[in-house]
Image (cartoon, rainbow, N blue to C red):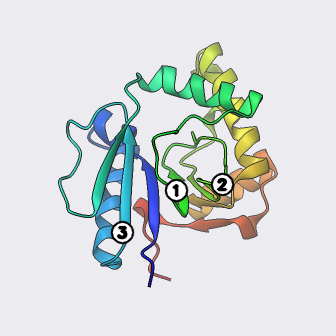
């Protein structure tokens, strides 16, 4: 049986201790614990701080998280590939709604959507952040295969504010659903 090959945006886990960072670390730990054959490719700006495990391979893009987001957004707009060094994977898990365009090497995308404050509380965010996030939320709405949301309230809010059908979303606290 061929192992599931999953690429995960690991940058959030390297930048902080709580919130999305904790979610991302818990997700990786759970995936390694649940499936003894899974292969994980952690995509980040650096390999420093990544877990050391025989089924974990770092994929370093070498950019700051801000420039990585802008590069991915531009890649979506022009239809370019950005992860040329990444081996073919079965799914890319975007832990913070930022993901590369799909391709034959990256056929499926699952996104964790933690909140929609750039839509519901736009004044809390800078103009650049609102523009980049707004563009990614539209790409997410149109092109992801499935969306993980940490709470039922988040599912309801995403359904109403972004128009995402509920059947494309699953409540998964800290990235793990035992259902």
Q: Position of residue 145 (x, y in %)?
A: 69, 61
Residue drawn at the location 19% of the way across and 60% of the way down = 53
Q: Residues within 10 Å of mark 1 (few under 14, many from 20)?
A: some
In terms of sequence position, does the residue under pointer 1 or pointer 2 come before the other? 1
In terms of sequence position, does the residue under pointer 3 or pointer 2 come before the other? 3
Distance between mark 1 and mark 3 Cα atoms = 18 Å
Residue occupying the far top of the picture = 127
| Vertical placement of residue 110 versus 65, above or below | below
Residue wearing tag 3? 31
| Quarter containing the N terminus | bottom left
Residue drawn at the location 56% of the way across and 67% of the way down = 171
Residue wearing tag 2? 104
- For label 1, the SS is loop
Residue wearing tag 1? 88
Q: Residues within 10 Å of mark 2 (few under 14, many from 20)?
A: few
In terms of sequence position, does the residue under pointer 1 or pointer 3 come before the other? 3
On residue 113, the disc is: none
Q: Position of residue 13 (x, y in %)?
A: 32, 43
Q: Please identify, in this view, whether the residue under mark 3 or under mark 2 is nearer the observer.
A: 2
Contact (Cβ within 8 Å) of mark 1 with mark 2: yes
Q: Quadrant of residue 168?
A: bottom right
Front position in the image: 13 or 53: 53
- For label 2, the SS is loop
Distance between mark 1 and mark 2 Cα atoms = 8 Å
Q: Residues within 10 Å of mark 3 (few under 14, many from 20)?
A: some
């Amino acid at each position: 049986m061929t192992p599931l090959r999953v690429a995960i945006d690991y940058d959030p886990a390297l930048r902080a201790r709580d919130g999305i960072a904790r979610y991302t670390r818990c997700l990786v730990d759970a995936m390694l614990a649940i499936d003894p054959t899974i292969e994980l490719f952690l995509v980040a700006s650096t390999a420093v701080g990544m877990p050391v495990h025989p089924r974990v391979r770092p994929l370093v893009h070498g950019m700051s998280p801000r420039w990585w987001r802008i590069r991915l957004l531009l890649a979506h707009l022009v239809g370019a590939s950005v992860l040329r060094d990444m081996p073919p994977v079965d799914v890319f898990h975007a832990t913070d709604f930022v993901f590369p365009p799909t391709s034959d090497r990256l056929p499926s995308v699952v996104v964790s959507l933690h909140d929609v404050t750039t839509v519901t509380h736009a004044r809390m965010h800078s103009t650049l952040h609102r523009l980049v996030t707004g563009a990614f939320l539209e790409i997410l709405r149109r092109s992801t295969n499935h969306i993980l949301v940490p709470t039922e309230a988040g599912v309801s809010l995403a359904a109403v504010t972004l128009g995402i059908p509920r059947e494309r979303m699953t409540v998964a606290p800290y990235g793990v659903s035992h259902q």
